[in-house]
Image: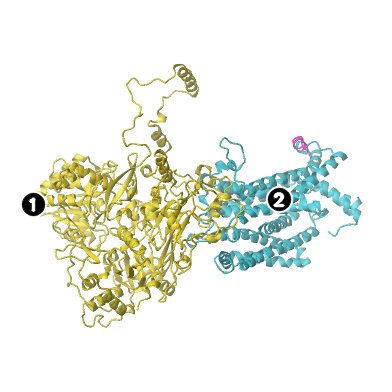
Amino acid sequence: MNQGAKESAARLDSLILGLVFGARRRVGWWAALAVSLGLLGLFVVSIAMVVGRGIGVWGLNVPVAWGFAIVNFVWWIGIGHAGTFISAILFVSEQSWRASINRFTEAMTLFAVACAGVFPLLHLGRIGVWYYLLPYPNDQGLWPQWRSPLMWDFIAILSYGTVSALFWFLGLVPDLARFRDRAPKLWQRRVFGLLALGWRGSSSQWIRYGQAYLLLGGLATALVVSVHSIVSMDFAISLNPGWHSTIFPPYFVAGAIFSGFAMVVTLLVPLRRMLGLGEWITLRHFDNMGKILLLTSLVVTHGYFMEAYLAWHSGDPQEMELLRQRLSGDASAVFWATIVFNSLLPQILWASSVRRNLGLLFVLSLLINVGMWLERYLIVVSTLEQRFLPASWGAFSGSFWDWGLFVGSFGLFFTLLLLFVRALPVVSLHEMKEHLAHETKEGGSDG
Amino acid sequence: MNTNRKQDEFGFDLAALPEGVSRRSFVKWMGASLAVASFSGCVRAPREEILPHVKAPEYRVPGKAKRYATVLNRGGSAMGVVVSQIEGRPQLIEGNTLHPASLGGLDAAAQAEILNLYDAARLRRIREGGAERSREEWRASLRQAAAAASETGGQGFGLVLPRLASPSLASLVEDVRQRLPEIRLYQNEEYEDEWLVDEEGRALLAVPDLGQARWVLSFDSDFLSDPELGPRLTRDFAKRREAADDPLALYVYEPAPSLTGGKATRRRALALNAIESLALALANGLEGRSDPAGGVELGPDYESLLKRLRDTGQGAVALAGGRLSREGQEAVARINRALGPEGRGVVYRRRDDLLETPLGGRRALQDDLRAGRLERLLCLGANPLRRLEKDDSVIEERIRTLVWSASLALRSNETEARLRWSVPQAHELEAWGDGVSYEGTVSIQQPLIAPLFGGESALDVLATLAGKSDPDAYEWVKGFWRDRYSGSDYEGFWRESLVNGVLDVAQIDFSARRSSRPQLGAADTKVRREEGRPWELLSQPEPARERESSFRNAWLQELPHPISKQAWGNSLWLSPSLAKELGVVAGDWIRVSWDEGTLEGPALPLQGMATDSIALPRGYGRTLDEGEGPVGFGDASLERRKRIRLKGIEKVSKRERLALAQLPATQEPGLFEPKEQGAKGHGQEAKRRSLYPDYQYRGYAWGMVIDLDACTGCSACMIACQAENNIPTVGKEQFSMGREMNWIRLERYFSEADAEGDSKPVFQPVACMHCEKAPCEVVCPVAATTHSSEGVNEMTYNRCVGTRYCSNNCPYRARRFNFFDYRKEDPEVARLQFNPNVTVRSRGVMEKCTYCIQRIEASRIRAIRENRRIKDGEIVTACQSICPAEAIVFGDINDPASEVSKKRMREDRYVLLEEEDTRPRTSYLPVRRREREEGSLG
C-alpha cells in the first residue's frame, strides 16, 4: 500500500468511526429521522386498520382481488435485488469496485425485504392463521398445496431474507470487531464485542471468512435469479391473459435489478454528499451503475415488446383485448407512463456525460422507480380489471389506507436506513482497505 | 353485544355468577368437585324428576326443515308458496308446485318476504299518540269507536284496505258494512295503473293463454315480470317455446327494455305515445273504420301488423301495459274483440270481485278527507298518505282533527306516523287467513310462527269492528269455508287443503275472479298527433322493489335491476343516442322539465330505450330506516300520471357514482353473446392433454345445465340462493366498489343490433362452474378449495386464509370475498332467518356456489337410510327450485338416464370459455334466435 492509499484508508476509517462515535450534531440526520418516524407512524396506523377492520379498508374487490399490497410487495422485493446483485454477483465475478457500496446496498436489500415481507402477510384475509402456510405436522394431516405458486413464493422469500441477512452480517463481522476495538464507551464495546463473535483477525479466521463469504455469495447469486423468477410465477402460473406468459421470469428478474439499481442511485447521490463519502463512492461507480441501468432497461423493454408481440402473434382474443386496453383503452395512461419512464428516458444513459452527471442521474433514477411501480400496477391491477366475461369486469382505485400503507412503508425503510448509517459501518472498512491496496498495486483508478 | 350472545348461548347471564369468588377458590372448587364427581360417577341431579329428550316428539328432527303450504298476497292475488320452517323459524319461501299461479316458480319479491318477517324495524308496541297501550286498551278503543260510529250508521267512518285477496276477510268487510251501512270504504293501491272495467265497474286483468295463442302482441306489457302473473306466464311461455314445431311469436312494442322484450321475436323501442297510436290505428283498422290512422305517420310496422292480425285471427293476442292511457287500453281490448270471441287467447278476469261493490281509491279518500267528510279513519295494512300531492296542509289539518284514527302496519310509514293509534300488524306468515289467486284458486294462509312482535292481523281488527265477540282468526277462516263446503268430511277436507295449499274447488261453493267482458266505447278512438319533439318522461314499473314492503328489503335493494343492473337506487334511463346528444355518461346528472315541474337526477344511458323517452323506475325516494337518506328519487305527479310530456332536457354539472353491477361498457350490442343455436355447440368438449390424470367418479358426479333460451333474466334465482345460503347484503357503498356477495349473478348483454338498429337484452346466469380442471384449486396455498369425489369444487371456510388467488384465477369470477364481517351489523332478529345447514362466513374468507351441497347431503342421508341410490330429481338446488322458467336442471351426470344427462346430450350444449380448458360441470343450452326462423316482418 502506498502513501496515498494509506492516507485514504485512514481518512475513511476516521470518517466511518466518526459517524458512529463522533460527537458532531447532525441536524439533517435528525430531521430526516423525524420525517421517517412520522411515515412509520402512518405505516403502523395503516397496519392497525387492516388488521383491525379487515382488508376491506383497501380498494380491493372482485375481480380486482389483488391490488396495492401485491404491487408494493413486488416492487420492494425488486429493489432488494440490486443489493444482492452488487454484493453477490459482482463479488463472485470479482468486480472489486463494488467494495465501497456493497455494505450499503446489502443493508438496503435487507430493509427492502423487510418492507416487502409485511405486504403478503397483511394481504391475507385472515392474518391470525397465517401459519396454515407452513408445512407443520398436525393431527388432521393437512399439508399445504405444493402446486400453488404462493407456496413457492412463501419459501423463496423466506430463504431470500435469511441468506441476505446472513450475508450482510457475515460481511459486517470484521468491521464490528474494529468498532469493538475503537468504541469509546464500555457498553458500546460490549455490544460490538458481542456482535463481532470473537473476531481476532487472525489468518486462519480470514481464510475461513473468505470461504464462508464466497459460499454465501454463491448462494445469494442463485437467489438473485430465483426469487423474482418465483415471484413472477405467482402471475405466470395463472390463466389470466397478461399473466399467463413464459417470458415472466427473466422479465421480472431484469425488472428487479433495474429498479434496484435505480433505488441505489436515488439513495447514494444524496447520502454520498451528506456523509462526505465522495472520495470513495466515485463517479466511476455511478458510471458503472448507469451502464447496468441501461442494460436492464433494454432487457425490460424487450420484455414489453415481446409481450405485445406474442399477444398479437397468438391471435388469442383475450390477449388482443388486453393489448388494446393497454395501447388505447382504460389502462393506456399507466402503460404509456411505464414505457416512457422505463424504456425511453433511460436511453439517455448511452452518453457517458449523463452517467456522470449526478443531478440528472438522480432525477432519472427517481422516474425509473416510479415507472417500475407503475409497471407492477399495470401487471397486477389493470390485468385483473377487465378479463374474460365482460359482465364481471370491474374497476379499482386505491383507498386512503392503500396509499397510507405504501407511503408508510417508506417510513420503515428510511428509519431503518438512517439508524443503520449511524450505528454500523456504512462502508465496508476491511474490504475497502483491501481494495485500496489492490488498486495501488494495479496502478490507480479512474475515480 | 358479546355478553348478549353469551346469554343467548347459555341461557343465563355469565356475569351474574356469585361475586367474591376468586380465581383461586374457583379453581380449588373445580378441582374438588372433579374429584367428588369421579368418585360418585355422576353430578348431582335436581330433586324434581326431569326427563331426557330421548324420544323426540313425532315429526320433529332438529335441523330438519318442515315445509308448510301457505299463500302470500301479491297485489290482490294470492300466490301459493311453500315455506320451510326449521326449529320453528320460517327460513325459506319457495313456490308451491300445486298452486296454479306458481307451479313452483316464484318472483324475487315474493321470496324476499321472509326477510320482511324478520325486519328489526317492524313495529313492536301498540301506541296511542306516542304512549304505549295494552292490547285490551286498543280493542276497547276500537269497539268504542265502532259503537260511536254505529249510532250514525257508520257515517264519517273511513276504512282503508289494501286490494283484497282474502275471501274471509272480504266477508268480514261485508259484515262491517252491515253493522255500519254508511261506512266509507277505500281500496288503497300503491300504484294506480289504468285498468279496464266491466259493466259492473270491476277492474279487469287480461290473462293471456300462452298454450293457445300463436302470436302475442305486447303494447308495453311486461307480462313476464308481473308480480301476479309473472311466475305462471313465464312457465307457460318457456314450455310453449320448448315445443319447437309450433313457434309462439312475441312482438313487443315498448319505450324501455323489459324482460318480456328480451324474449321477443320482434322488439321495437317506441315512445309510449307512438305505441298507443299504433294500437288505436290497428283497432280502427280491424274494425274496418275509415282512415284508421287519422293521418298520423305510424312507422313501417303498421301495415304488416294489420295484415298479420287479420291472417292470424283468433290465434293472436294483444296485451296492454299499465302505463297505457284509457284510450290505449280500450284499443288493445278492441283488437282482441275484433280478432274473435274473447277467451280464446286472452281471458279478462275480475281483479276485485270479493266485495259486493267496488271500492273507491286513494283519490276518493283524499277528496273525502279534504272535504271533511270523515271523522274516524282506520287504515289496515295500507299507506294511503304516502306522497300527498296538493293541498297537503288541508289534509294534514283534517287528519289532525279526526275524532279517532288508527293504523295497522308492519312498519312505520307516512300514514302510521299521522294517525292516533299505531298497531303493529302481524306478517302474512304469522296469521291465519286465506287467499284467492288471479285465476280463482283458493288457498288457506297458515301461520308459520306466532307473531314475533305481538301483532294483530287485519282479520282480527275487522272482526272486532264487525262486533264479533272474542275474534279468533283461525275459527273464522275455518268456519267461513265450512259454510261453503258441500262434502261430508270437513275436517279431512280442511287438513288436505292445508297440506296441499289449494282447496279443491269441486267441493266448495265459491267462485271468484270470474271472467268478464271489458266495457268499451267510452274512450276516444281517434289517433292523436303530438306536436314537437316527442320527449316524454315515463314512470317505469319496478316489479321487484316498487311495493312498500319490497322497497325496504335489503335483499331486493341489493338485487341488481335485471336490465339496468343498478342496485340501491334508480336513475333516469335514456337512449344512448339521446345521451350522446346531451353529452352525458352513466352517473352524470340531467334535468328534465315540463310545464308544472322539473326533476333532476343521475342519467343512465341504456340500450333498447326509445330515442326520445326517458324512464324513471318508480317507487324510489323513500328511506329504508329512520334517520337515513332516501334511496333513489321520485316524483309524486310522475307516479300518478305515468307519462309526462317534456319541454326540455339538459345536462347538470353534477356526477354520482351509481351502484352498477356491470360496467356501462357492457351495454355495447353484441359485445359478448351467449352462443346461439346453429353456432355449433359442443356436445362433447374436446379433451386436451394434461399432466395430471383425470378424476375418476365411481358414484355420483353432479352437474348442471342452464337453458338460456328459457331464462328470462328475472333474477329470482339470486334471491333463492341468498335465502338458502345465508348470503349477506353489503350495502350501497360496498356494492359500488364491486363487493356484492351473490353467488349466482345474472349477466346481461345486449344482442347484436338487428337490421333496424334494435337490440334486446339477453341473460346468462353465472355461478361457480365446478370445473373438472378447476384453476382455483391448484393455486390455493393451503388447499382450502378442493375437488370432491363427486366433482363438486368445495370450499373449506375454516381452512381459508384469504389470499384471494382462487378468485384471480377463476375465469368466471364466480367467487366472492368477505372483505369485512358483513354480518356484524345484522340485527339479532335477522339471524332467525339463517339456514342452520349452511355456515355463516366470517371476515376474510372466500365463498361461492356450492351446488347447494347441504341439499345434496340431505338427500344422501335419506337415500342411505332407505338403502338406495339418490333418485334423479331428488336434489333440487335453490336456484333450480325457484326458477319460473325451469331453466336450470341439476343431477347426476354419471347416470345416463338422468334429466341433466339428457340435456347434456344435446348437440348444441356448450360450456363457457371452453378455450381455457377448465371443463366446467355447468353447461349451457343456447339462445334460439326465432327472428330468423320466423322471417322478418313485412
As measured in the structure, the alpha-carbon distance from the residue carrying label 2 to the one carrying label 1 is 95 Å
* One can see residue B544 in this view: yes
Q: Is residue A99 visible?
A: no
Name the amino acid type tagged 2.
Answer: Met
Residue B56: give x, y in percent of width and height: 34, 32
Tell me the colour chain B is drawn in.
yellow
Q: Is residue A426 magenta?
A: no
Residue B600 coordinates in the image, percent (x, y):
37, 66
What color does chain A have in the rendering?
cyan
Question: Where A277 falls versus B295 (above or below)?
Answer: above
Task: Check disc 1 and give the amino acid type.
Answer: Gly
* Subunit of label 2: A
Q: Which residue is mark 2?
A: A108
Discs 2 and 1 share one subunit = no
Q: Secondary structure at mark 1?
A: loop
Q: Quadrant of the N terminus of chain B?
A: top left
- Tell me the quarter of the picture where residue B238 sits: bottom left
Residue closest to the eye, B343 or B263 = B343
Residue B634: which numbered mark, if any?
none
